[in-house]
Image: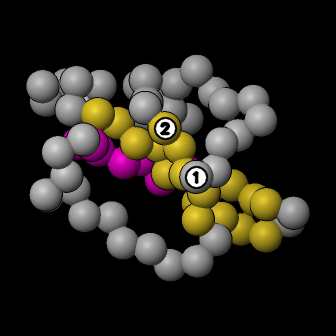
Amino acid sequence: MYVPDDPPANCPACGDPYDSVSRHADGFVANLLDNERYQRVCFYPATDDGDPVLDCYHHTHEQAGTD
């Protein structure tokens, strides 16, 4: 999984704490309906060596306020 060299303290998309972050350069699927660990994923645009990517910030149920 992608781990930033200098991860932000809070999610840059929503400002809430997050559990982990992943980076995606290709297509992907986010299904949270059946996810016991994560309630919300925020998508934040970034670049990797000049190429567009999406950083996905994963929020647990507790972090998303749905505990």
Residue located 58% across and 21% down the image: 9
- The percent position of residue 12, horizontal first and vertical second, equals 55, 35
Relative to 30, residue 21 above or below: above
Locate the C terminus and report the quarter of the image it occupies: top left
**Would you say residue 13 is visible in this rendering?**
no
- The percent position of residue 4, horizontal first and vertical second, equals 70, 40
What amino acid type should be assigned to the residue bearing mark 1?
Met
In primary-sequence order, the first of circles 1 and 2 is 1
**Would you say residue 65 is visible in this rendering?**
yes
Tell me whether the residue at label 1 lies in contact with that at label 2, contact meaning CB atoms closer than 8 angstroms.
yes
* Disc 1 packing (10 Å; few <14; some 14–19; many ≥20): few
| Left or right, residue 11 beside residue 48 | left
Residue located 63% across and 27% down the image: 8
Observer-side mark, 1 or 2, equals 1
Q: Secondary structure at mark 1?
A: loop
- Residue ranking furthest to the bottom: 27
- Which numbered marker is on residue 1? 1
- The percent position of residue 17, horizontal first and vertical second, equals 43, 23
Q: Secondary structure at mark 2?
A: strand
Residue 60, image quadrant: top left
* Disc 2 packing (10 Å; few <14; some 14–19; many ≥20): some
Report the span colored magenta.
38-45
| Left or right, residue 47 beside residue 40 | right
Q: Is residue 49 magenta?
A: no
- Which numbered marker is on residue 22? none
Relative to 46, residue 19 above or below: above
What amino acid type should be assigned to the residue bearing mark 2?
Ser
Q: Which residue is mark 2?
A: 20
